[in-house]
Structures are given as structure tokens and as C-alpha cells.
Image: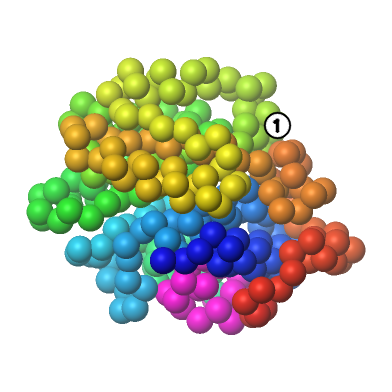
Amino acid sequence: MASIAELQSIATQIRRDIVRMVHAVQSGHPGGSLGCTDFFTALYFEVMQHQPVPFDMDAKGQDVFFLSNGHISPVFYSTLARSGYFPVNELSTFRKIDSRLQGHPTTHEHLPGVRVASGSLGQGMSVAVGAALAKKLNNDASIVYSLCGDGELEEGQNWEAIMFAGAKGVDNYIATIDWNGEQIDGPVKKVMDLGDLRAKFEAFNWVVTVIEQGNDMASIVAGLQHAKTLLHQGKPVVVLLKTVMGKGVDFMEGTHEWHGIAPNDAQLANALAQLPETLGDY
């Protein structure tokens, strides 16, 4: 088990990777990536039972994760590399021609750790539900996890998957919603207010748990471990994770403006000054 301090150190390096990757090609999505860094760190380095090497697409006997909001690929790639799925120095190829680390994760690049392409929003829950059902059919007791954004819940396909999972009792599945209240065009409440998410999921026969401090490592680890105790009781589980977009870089925090904008040289230097190198840069 990793200590909270060790997990925080990993998260700091992943945030550093994120801003460097996006800056290097002047393209990418730093805001959501930074906001979800603590979640990814907790999941991959403490909570999820997985084996990076050798990578196995079937993942028999292993927990699996599906990223639905694929535009936050910087945090996904850094987490995969730092947890051993592929060499850390490959992060330097992010979004470059012929790289396996494209702007949105793809499967035809055969990048270890990526089990589904997630360029189009709204599809991750459907894939995760299918994987969870496959594990049930195979008598595999391991867990399926997914992440999607709160703005992404405006996509109708999510609600088909939510309805199906609740109706069919897909109780080996934990879905997490990045509940930061921001999306590309502004605050979610102004673009398309989602209303009472807890009540909606409960109406679809889900168990709902909330992590109020979605950027506090101890709270995330405890919250995800608690979510695991709610499984195998006839209902899927959803974690409403309250995060801050851009967390860790003060001028990016709490605004949709950094959803898909790369920092310039001066902004990168400012960001890196707030994120000390902990594990070694790529």
C-alpha cells in the first residue's frame, strides 16, 4: 500500500507531466486532466487491482478502467506510464505524428492500458457495462471502473446505459462522474443544468456515493474503497466526485477557459514552479 504522502507525490509529478505535454505541442486539454489527477493516482496506485505487464486486453482476474471523456488523455497517459504500462519517456511523443499517444486514446495504436477508443463523448458507460456483464458471464469477480465528465452526461447514450445497468443489476461496476461543474462552453448549470444527480441515479436503481473533496487524496482513497464495499448487492455504484478543474495550477483553477488551451512559455514556467519535480521528468 502507498501512503497518502507517496500518492500526493505521484500526483504532483503527473500534473507536471500534463502541463509539459500540452505545452510541447500547443494542443490538448489541461483543465480536466489536472482536476482528475488525484482520482487517477488513487485509482491506479492504490485502489484498482491490475497488472500493467504483460498487458492483457481480456484482463481476466483483473480490474479494468474505461475513460469516457477521452480528451483528458494527458492525465490518462501519464498515469499509465508512471504505473508501468509503457516507458515514461514516450510521453514526449504526445499528439505527434505516428505517436501512440494521440489526442484521444485509440486502440489501433496498441497502447498498453487503453481498452477502448474514447474520442466521442458519451460512450464509456455503455462499454463499461458490457465489460462488467462479460466478467459476470466468465465468473470473474474483479471490478469494472469508468470515468465520465458531468458535462458529458448531456449525451443521451449515457442515460440508456444508466437505465440498463440499473435494470439488469450490473453490480460489479463503479462509475465515477467528474463533477467539476465546468464544460467547454462554460458552467454546466448554464449550458444544460443536470439537476439532482443523486436523485436521478437513485431513480435508475443505482447506489450513489459522493466524494465532497475530490482533490483531497485521503478522501478519494477512502471514498473509492467505500464504493467497493457497496458492490455485489444487486445495483451498480456511482461516485459523484467533486473536483476543481485545473487543480494544482492556480491560474487554471475553477474555470472552463483552460478546458482545451495550452499554456505559453511564461505560463508553463509559472505552472512548473507550483509543481516540483518528484519522480523525474521524462
Is residue 189 magenta-colored? no
The C terminus: image quadrant: bottom right
Q: Disc 1 marks which amino acid? A: Gly
Q: Position of residue 93 (x, y in %)?
A: 61, 76
Residue identifier under label 1: 186
Is residue 76 magenta-colored? yes
1 sits to left or right of 32: left
**Residue 10 visible in the current orientation:** yes
118 sits to left or right of 215: left
Who's the residue at 89% across and 63% down the image? 266
**Residue 100 visible in the current orientation:** no
Q: Position of residue 262 (x, y in %)?
A: 75, 57
Q: Position of residue 248 (x, y in %)?
A: 71, 53
Who's the residue at 61% across and 53% down the image? 33
Who is closer to the viewer here, 38 or 58?
Answer: 38
The N terminus: image quadrant: bottom left
Indicate whether 80 appears above or below 173: below
164 sits to left or right of 248: left
Q: Which residues are magenta?
A: 75-98
